[in-house]
Amino acid sequence: MQYTGSKFIGSYVNRRMEGQAEYILPTDTKYVGEMKDGMFHGEGTLFFPSGSQFDATWEKGLVVKGKYTFQDGLQYDDKHWHYCDSYDRRFYTEICFGLKPAGIVQLTNMDPPRTIPLGCYDCGDGFYNPTTRIIKDFRGRFLRNADDDEHEWIIRTCRKRLMNKPEQKA
């Protein structure tokens, strides 16, 4: 695969990838499974660098059915997805193992947990300052300006470090 930067480990039939194989893309995403006529075909799994994976049945390179599993074991369900939505803000570990007693940080698997800046909100992909209406990533780099809908959603649903409270861990 010198032209694409991919790597193929398996057999060829009539110069096409065929049978049980391993196909590694330039992004380090790896497919392990069946191939036919140079395409994913049959049972196979995509393993992503993040640690997540997609198990699927393929037909001529297209997914017939599949299941995506995040790195932490949470399985995506496209019909009944309620993980961390506006109705249920619990994290996966809370759903599986329940809430920990007050004072024990459980909101993230980061070590050490993030510190929310004074007066700001942790909106998932960064910190939101409601005064400037700017969202910066966790390294302090500009991400975006919040529109009215996002501002209202963050104020209503996200955790905030209050001005007069001691440091809150995110």
Image: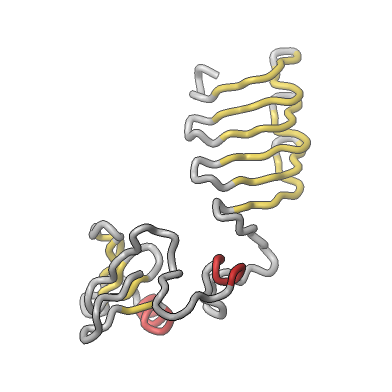
| Number of callouts | 0
**164, 23: nearer the viewer:** 164
Q: Residue furthest top?
A: 14
Q: Please give the name of the residue rendered at 26% of the width and 57% of the height, measured from the top-left corner.
A: 139
Indicate the quadrant where residue 159 lies: bottom left
Q: Please give the name of the residue rendered at 74% of the width and 22% of the height, measured from the top-left corner.
A: 18
The location of residue 7, given as percent across then percent down, is 55, 22
Instruction: Give above or below for 48 relative to 117.
Output: above
Colouring method of the image: secondary structure
Q: Please give the name of the residue rendered at 40% of the width and 66% of the height, measured from the top-left corner.
A: 124
Instruction: Give above or below for 132 relative to 78.
Output: below
Indicate the quadrant where residue 153 lies: bottom left
Task: Locate the N terminus by quadrant.
Answer: top right
Instruction: Tell me: 53 left or right of 155.
Output: right
**113, 155: nearer the viewer:** 113
**97, 3: nearer the viewer:** 97
Task: Locate the C terminus by quadrant.
Answer: bottom left
Q: Residue furthest bottom?
A: 164
Instruction: Tell me: 125 left or right of 21.
Output: left
The location of residue 44, given as percent across then percent down, is 71, 37
The location of residue 39, given as percent across then percent down, is 70, 30
Indicate the quadrant where residue 103 lies: bottom left
Q: Please give the name of the residue rendered at 35% of the width and 63% of the height, measured from the top-left corner.
A: 113
